Image (cartoon, helix red, strand yellow):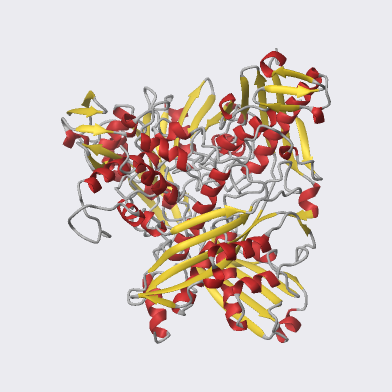
Amino acid sequence: MTQTFKMDEPLPRLLDETRQGLIGTPMNRPDGPLKVSGRADYAADRLPDGTAHGVLVRATITKGKVTRLDESALAGIEGVVAVLSGPNFVRNPAQGMAGESPVQPGPRVDYHGQPIALVVAETFEAARDAAQRLVVEYDDAGGAEVDPDSASEVETDDPDATGDWDEAWGRAAAKVDVTYTTPGQVSAAMEPHAALAHWDSGRLTLHGSQQMLRFNRKELADAVGVDPSEVRILSPYVGGGFGSKLGIGAEAVSAALASRDLGRPVRVVMARQTVFDAVLRRTQTSQHVRLAADADGRLLALGHDDLVSNLPEESFAEPTTNASQFTYGAAALRFQQSVARIHRTPSGSVRAPGEAVGMVVLEAAVDELAGELGMDPVELRLKNIPDTAPLTGQDYSGRRLADCLRQGAERFGWAQRPKAERDGDWLIGCGMAAAARKNMLTKAAARVRLTGAGAVVETDMTDIGTGSYAILAQIAGELLGLPESKVEVRLADTDLPGASGSGGSFGAGSTGSAVFLAARRIREQLAAQLGCEPGELTLQDGIARGANVEKSLADLVQDELVGEAEIASGEAAKSHLSAGWGAHFCEVAVHAWTGEVRVRRMLGLFDIGRVLNRKTATSQAVGGMIWGLGGALTEELHHDPRTGHIANRDLANYHVAAHADAAGRIEADFVDDRDDWANPMQSKGVGELGISGSGGAVLNAIHAAAGVRIRHLPATPDKVIAALEAAGR
Amino acid sequence: MHTQLDVNGRAYALDHDPRTTLLDALRDHIGLYGTKKGCDHGQCGACTVLVNGRRINSCLTLAAMHDGDEITTVEGLGEPGALAPLQQAFVDCDGYQCGYCTPGQIMSATGMLEEAKAGDPSHVSASLSGDVALDDSEIAERMSGNLCRCSAYPFIRQAIHSVEGKE
């Protein structure tokens, strides 16, 4: 029987009592040797005999209907097998944790770039050629709205508000009332979305590139019309996700449908351009921030309203003001969201949905307020850390924000920072920002099996680069007293217990806790066999000790011991607000004549509760910070104003940060803490914390260096030059 | 059409579509899936391999253009249990996260180190001639054709630094 544990109250800190010394260490990833030698098999890294190749065809109108697929132009192409479309085709990937098929529009087209057909051929070259030559006839509805700023259909929520806004605003000594915009962005995981499907006796097996298998199985089953028990998905290695692989998309569904129709394996790999077109983007945002403070810098009013966009009927709306609602306190608060319904590639979760763009703007606006007050921006933030969560009244769980701010400032040398200095043609300055990202616990199950030879961890959790293989081995090894070499971690197979999946930074905490609880059950069994209480048991390097008895696990474990456990969120999530916290510090150089911005150094200091693996956590944090840098300086989707079509749909035109952009000293570290209300391991998520606020530190540094505020991201040279000229510099 | 490739010291005789890229030949014809396809347009570097010792985006060249050429892929550098020093350095420095760009980063760095040793200057080199001092900005410049969306860049360069001049 699976034990389900609900997180209602803190548990004793067992990981501080265990003896193995594995948890928290900078252990190398066990999957590393496979990855560096090219032997980790990603979804497209196989081609079983008889596999046909599928290439997706996209809509070249924005709104209307496909009336005919004219295959006559394909007649001369050798090896074309089939052209497939139909009622099961999906319009876009499922939103995260949907657990059901995304919209299946039939012949209807809702955005330019929507996948509308799959061309299957014996070779990739023939399939690509045929996909390009296929003639699609449309009934073009015309008149589709594609611009969020002029959309006629805008849904505006009732505001979340507290306090007397007019009163608070009216008595302020300093105010900021600004509008910032952020452009559409994409995940741009390095591995394009890929699927290899084949059916055997009515059962579908899919090698896919997916983040959340427990949900993906249901989504795929629903899309192709079979029971979830007939679907098996494997994603042992995923070449980056960042939200783009949360839900089942066109590559998986079309591969499954084609394979069923044709009775042979079918592989579909999205072209990079298709990934831009047909995978959920991050919405562009327009954000109106109002801040008011008294003369001492205490916030009186904090308002953050936003306009985002999505397709009609897509439920997701970027939660832009997430962190604004719990980071600072003020007498009056106001948050209101509007969603423009437009026909662009639909929007969805991209790394840190909400915070990634909302916190950049909040933290830039707070910097503007510090300027108005003539106050140090670190001091201003320290002064406005609330006692309880302002909107909900919840207590905070572990929250070392003040320590991150103070210790980060100390380590960065904030007090001695260069202020508006000049280095040849370069203007030098420093900025900072706070970081906050809500921490969540979601349902997750795992099984641990122990024999005399070692332990095996089994769960359908994915490792999308986050380090699941490493930390789950560390958790099991720590609890069972085994070195790394004696723990094997098997992941990402829907035949294994259903995990949280990778998303929302909750994977490590949720699935890790399931492994923790499963291993704890085995500890109880070992204690019973040894004849001691579980609390007396110590396990280290394969030796069990308790009740004055010492036995090797090889002697103690005759039959395999199995522990299986499930964890779910409980009362703790209601009573306490758990979040990751941090502070970013950044030094930039702004070229006086070209407007180029170079990041010279960045430091992020974060509170993620217990650090499970110092090495992989640092990588996650630094990676997030560099995402923030890219968002501040280079990343921007451009849409054709007539069709909404993504015009820069490749990696040469959509600029993710490259080595040279991240050539400065970029460092992350952690304040060691235990968040007792978060989960049984006292850990918190790290994957999205680094991006939260880091772009704000970059923007604030640009202001410190050059005296200009760039309020329309990204801060590309043209905007910086224009701002410098406008400022008469 | 027929092409003979020497890949990691082994000869392969391929019968392939003339449009087949070197990348697809390595992956789907020979079965060496370590070389990755990230963009198929020479924009990301995930497909980098060595051709006769020089690094190249294998997606931007046709297999047919490499008859008789010596190709080295990431599988040819080392394997688990017998990794090349640079591969081990990537593991030790955590010079990756998802691992998808990693073969390209490693092959690119392997080629890059040879270019620097031969004195090839880069955009950030102080001089067009003479020895190249591979400081961080030199390595960053020379590795900028290899994107890493996980943004493991500082750790990738740490790994490269750690083996530089040590072979």
Residue sitting nearer the eye, A482 or A195: A482
Considering depth in this image, is A675 or A718 the residue closer to the camera?
A675
| Whether residue A312 can be seen here | no
Quarter of the picture holding the N terminus of chain A: top right
Q: Position of residue A29 (x, y in %)?
A: 51, 36
Horizontal relation, residue A269 to residue A545: left or right = left
**Where residue A98 sits: x, y (%)?**
62, 45
Identify which residue is drawn at 57% across, 74% down: A367
Q: Is residue A142 visible?
A: yes
Quadrant where the C terminus of chain A is found in the figure: bottom left
Say above or below: B136 vs B17. Answer: below
* Quadrant housing residue A379: bottom right
Q: Position of residue B154 (x, y in %)?
A: 43, 51
Give coordinates of residue A592: x percent, y percent.
Answer: 36, 77
Give the camera-side residue of B114 and A433.
Answer: B114
- Report whether B138 appears left or right of B81: left
Question: Image quarter for residue A34?
Answer: top left
Q: Is residue A174 above or below residue A237?
A: below
Q: Count how many numbered circles sit on residues in the image.
A: 0
The image quadrant that residue A569 belongs to is top right
Residue plotted at (65% across, 38% down): A511
